[in-house]
Image (spheres, rainbow, N blue to C red):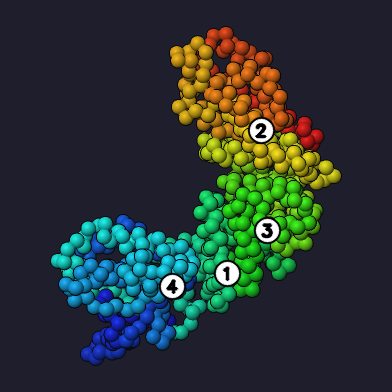
Amino acid sequence: MGSIVGTIINISDYLKPEKIAIYIDVGSNRENIFDLEKNRVYIIPDYQREIRWQKENLIELMMDLKSGCKFVGNIILSKKNNEYFIIDGQQRTTIMLMLITYIRYKFGSQLDISDTCILINNSFEGLEKLFENNFDLSQIVINEITDTDYYNQLNHYINLWNYIEETNIINDQDSAESLYKNIMKSEINIIINREDNLGTSIDYFLDTNLKGVKLDSEDIFKCYLFSKDTSNSIRESWKTLKKYSFILEKHAIKYTLMNVLYQYIACDLYKYKNGKFKNYKFKEDFTLSEFEEESKYYKGEHLIKVINDKNYMQKSINIINEYLKIICDIACNDDQTEMFKSNFSEIDDQERKVIFKLIKNIIKDSNLIPKVTLMKYIVESIILGKRRKDECRRIYAVFFFTTFFNTFESKKERNTVYNLMKNDDWERALINQIKKYFSNTNLTKANAALQYKYTLDNNDLDERYRCKALAALYNYFEIKNEKICVKDINQLYTFLNDDNSYSIEHFIISNNRTGKIKINGFPNNEYVIPQGFRKYKNSIFNFIFVDKDKNNELENFNVILKIQMLKEYSFQCEYSKMIFGIVKSFIDENEDIKLLQSTLSEYTLNLFFEDKFIRLYVEFINLVFDKIVEKFKV
């Protein structure tokens, strides 16, 4: 720690480009502890977090400075020649420079505003040009900015600049002069690490931030990664990771960078160094939760420190980037691209189109946990595999499993999924788990209630995707010779893509936000379903597939009238025909429903929903599940 020195100085000394000699009093003597060199450059290193200040933070600082000069905290620097890397304090440094730049831009012809040091952001090199042009994008070739914006920070900086004006705190010459003087007279505690070592600098950064305001898990992961590997290649790989994560975010895919990193390492680390870490478990923030007692590590230790192998991390991130490249290609396109065709070249075109659609369904589903099976499939079969037909067709087991998990399992079973992916023969492990689902007679009893919870938590779009996935399994999949197979690839393709013949209809509870359904004889021929039961319209079991004309004809009639209207209808979807048959039997045979029909009124309907509906719904799900089990003969 002898290389660290520091003292309190004015922000004026910190930000002016002149050479500043920093002294401290030692007894009766003054000692020069360090110099801030002339024309120095402040650099925000690439392991730093992105700009995080919000409008509220900016206003709070400006109001403080409006009232007088302040102490604004610590600035920790690492010096290398004439460059000063900001270990801690980059957000405050950036904002102070923005305020001074704004005042110079608005009132520079009236006030004497000093020049300031140059600020370079290694993860956004275009920031320097933004400062030079007073954050006016019309004065800049936009590609010169966006091409360097590796972490999508441009809009955040522009918003902060605009907020300065919107606050109206700097609204005239006097307020600008007062704020500027208060900034320059304010103080910071400046600390300099004079040791020219990147790893040491990152360690200081982590020590400082982990003991104060917490970094998020991505910040910490990146810092540890860069501290163990100072090469440019790992930084370029990280930029690529971020690029793909922004693409997924843009397409509203719920699959963050940290989700992807966690899923890959959780299902790959068991193979590393002959299972050295197979008994190590870590949380989603990559800190150890369980490990071998005789190890030298402790609970809470970061996984990258434990692995301590830059080659493994570089290789892992390269594979993850290949995976994300494939995922983003599918997420961003409505049909297979040339890249997708090349990855699945052993499969004929029609089957390849089906595989594209199945993968896209999994990507778009909001449930994160089963996505790990898709990762395992793409990594093992496409990226590292030989892409043979049998390897490509493993997607059928993945699709089957993810559909069942999304329908019948809770997040509590996440460890089950991750453990399955630690099998060398992971496809067989998935199929065995599917068989367990079929053989577990308690499954629907426990999960009927869970399905009700899903109707509250998930949106309509999620459940439509899931219902079509479940119907696709029922109509076109089979378990044959210990494999998941498709019986008719052409019919499956038509079902997945023809929304005219297979239009989706809310069946038991109609899709009406006000809860109104049509019942003859009621006032205005309408009944309003009690508020607590309207969410059942989102239930995965509340959908059938009919052609578009019939769908329009059914409108928001009640289910009894829909049954009558569909009596002569020829269902093209076997799953929908099965659902229709079960619901029709309920209406024809259930004594509670018969009694309801004979005494139909708003009062009896309200009583039916409060006392009978959930019980009958659970029975209905059990009957559906029984039919699915029967269909697959498991």
Q: CA distance from mark 2 to mark 1?
A: 45 Å
Q: Secondary structure at mark 1?
A: helix
Q: Which residue is mark 1?
A: 237
Q: Position of residue 325 (x, y in %)?
A: 62, 61
Q: Mark 4: which amino acid?
A: Glu
- Mark 4 surroundings: few (<14), some (14-19) or many (≥20) residues within 10 A: some
Which residue occupies the extreme right position in the image?
481
Q: Nearer the viewer, residue 195 or 357?
A: 357
Tell me which label, 2 or 1, sits earlier in the chain: 1
Q: Residue 525 location in percent, x, y?
A: 48, 15
Marks 1/3: CA distance?
A: 24 Å
Disc 2 target residue: 501
51 left or right of 371 in image: left
Task: Name the residue at 65% across, 69% down.
Answer: 315
Residue placed most toward the observer, 420 or 533: 533
Q: Position of residue 32 (x, y in %)?
A: 30, 89
Is residue 250 among what the camera can see?
A: yes
In the rendered structure, which disc, 1 or 3, sits on the residue that comes first in sequence?
Answer: 1
Q: Nearer the viewer, mark 4 or mark 2?
A: 2
Estimate the x, y position of residue 302 in percent, counting from the top left. 55, 65
Disc nearer the start of the sequence (3/4):
4
